[in-house]
Amino acid sequence: MAFDFSPTTTWFSPQYEINLAGDSAIEKAVVTQVASYGKQLGKITQAVLELAEGEPGDAFASLRKMADDINAIKQHTLADKIEADLKRLKQQDNAAYQALIKRL
């Protein structure tokens, strides 16, 4: 269990992030760039109701777009992590970095 308490707070709106699973950087990007947890839940609820009525419509399409946006953030974040790890490996152990590059 990981707790991520944001050091950036304001007097009127303190923000505490509790991340029980997953990647806190991805969670933050999704909430700030795609939709808050409440909006995500609302889209899911509307899409489920459309499916229950047998008529997938705008809410279902909106849910699919949100899922695509979240996946794009995950892929971008993964690439950023790989790039940062490679830079760190090159700085810390250039021989291991060169060997890895040859393997790739």
Image (cartoon, helix red, strand yellow):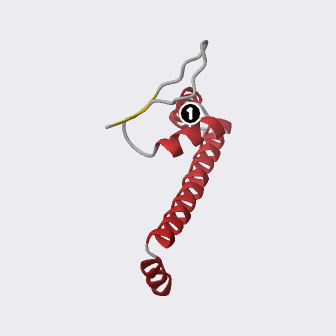
Left or right: 75 as drawn, with respect to 93: right
Left or right: 60 as drawn, with respect to 93: right
Q: Residue at x 54, y 67 (%)?
A: 87
Please rate how many residues cluster around mark 1, counting C-alpha atoms within 10 Å: few if below 14, some from 14 to 19, many from 20.
some
Outermost top residue = 12
Q: Is residue 17 above or below residue 96?
A: above
Which residue is denoted by mark 1 in the rendering? 40
How far across and how far down the image is residue 13, in percent?
Answer: 59, 16
How far across and how far down the image is residue 62, in percent?
Answer: 65, 40
Q: Nearer the viewer, residue 7 or 39?
A: 7
Query: Label 1 sits on what residue type?
Result: Gln
Q: Secondary structure at mark 1?
A: helix
Outermost right residue = 58
How far across and how far down the image is residue 46, in percent?
Answer: 58, 30
Q: Is residue 87 above or below residue 10?
A: below
Outermost bottom residue = 102
In which quarter of the view is residue 14 placed? top right
In which quarter of the view is residue 39 placed? top right
Q: Residue at x 68, y 38 (%)?
A: 58
